[in-house]
Amino acid sequence: AQSVTQLDSQVPVFEEAPVELRCNYSSSVSVYLFWYVQYPNQGLQLLLKYLSGSTLVKGINGFEAEFNKSQTSFHLRKPSVHISDTAEYFCAVSERGGTASKLTFGTGTRLQVTL
Amino acid sequence: DGGITQSPKYLFRKEGQNVTLSCEQNLNHDAMYWYRQDPGQGLRLIYYSQIVNDFQKGDIAEGYSVSREKKESFPLTVTSAQKNPTAFYLCASKERTKVDTGELFFGEGSRLTVL
């Protein structure tokens, strides 16, 4: 079975600074990887996903993530954050080849952007 | 616009009462899911359904029940047997595609508070 670890529960950062949210996964087979964002009292919205091809994936709102198979990581980055990026971010993984693939989520990282 | 509608958004109940959370989707998705979200614990799967009239338990099904009589509807009942029901509940659906990546689309959530 797969698992996801988000090492940082909270990440404080100043506006216009760069940010990296870390995600590591564990699986015995190849995987698909996702980042979702959740604003307060709302559902989850897909930021980006890695299915195949280029390991650098670009998403909405200027975010990008890089799949590193050897380090089993899928870290999320943004070169310059905005106040509106304050939210909770979830990394998720599913296994390739499943007939009824289910996502496994990390525990989330709260990004707090301040002036 | 297509999407997933959860109602009510906020719900209060007294201990010992059953309560039903509604989830309706007009995306024509086959699979539907219920997750529970608690601070610092990420998302935990309660029940899921791949097709009408069929559903499976997730990781934390005790104290919950579901039905899937129609493709577009997947209501969740939180019973009095659920020992700690106060939480944020998220409904999600998944499109049937040639390759099942596990990608989910989420509703806006329902916050249940037991008084």
Image: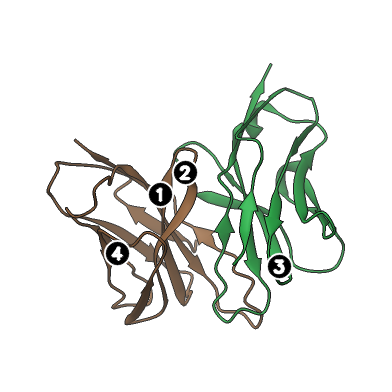
Chain colours: A green, B brown
Q: Nearer the viewer, residue B84 or A111?
A: B84
Compared to residue B88, the image places residue B45 above or below, namely below
Name the spot of residue A12 as percent of width and height, x first. Answer: 67, 24
**Cβ–Cβ under 8 Å for marks 2 and 1:** yes
Label 4 – label 2 distance at C-alpha:
19 Å
Q: Specify the label residue A31 is tagged with.
A: 3
3D distance between C-alphas at marks 3 and 1: 27 Å
Q: Chain of mark 1?
A: B
Q: Are marks 1 and 4 in contact (CB under 8 Å)?
A: no
Disc 2 sits on a residue from what chain? A
What residue appears at the point 56 percent right and 59 percent down from the top-left corner?
A104
In the picture of the structure, the residue carrying the numbered disc 2 is A42
Badges 2 and 3: C-beta atoms under 8 Å apart?
no
Q: Amino acid at mark 4?
A: Pro
Instruction: Read off the chain for label 3.
Output: A
Write down the residue under mark 1. B109
**Mark in front: 2 vs 3:** 3
Question: In percent of the image, x 65 and y 83: which residue is there?
Answer: B98
Q: CA distance from mark 2 to mark 1?
A: 6 Å
Whether B112 is drawn above or below A81: the answer is below
Q: Secondary structure at mark 2?
A: loop
The residue wearing badge 4 is B75
User: Residue B113 at x, y = what percent?
Assistant: 26, 39
| Marks 2 and 1 on same chain | no
- Which of the two labelled residues, at mark 1 and mark 4, occupies the earlier sequence position? 4
Q: Nearer the viewer, mark 4 or mark 3?
A: 3
Q: Chain of mark 4?
A: B
Q: Looking at the image, can residue A37 be seen? A: yes
**Residue projecting furthest to the top:** A115
> Within 10 Å of the Cα at label 4, are there few (<14), some (14-19), or many (20+) other Cα atoms?
many
Instruction: Determine the secondary structure under disc 1.
Output: loop
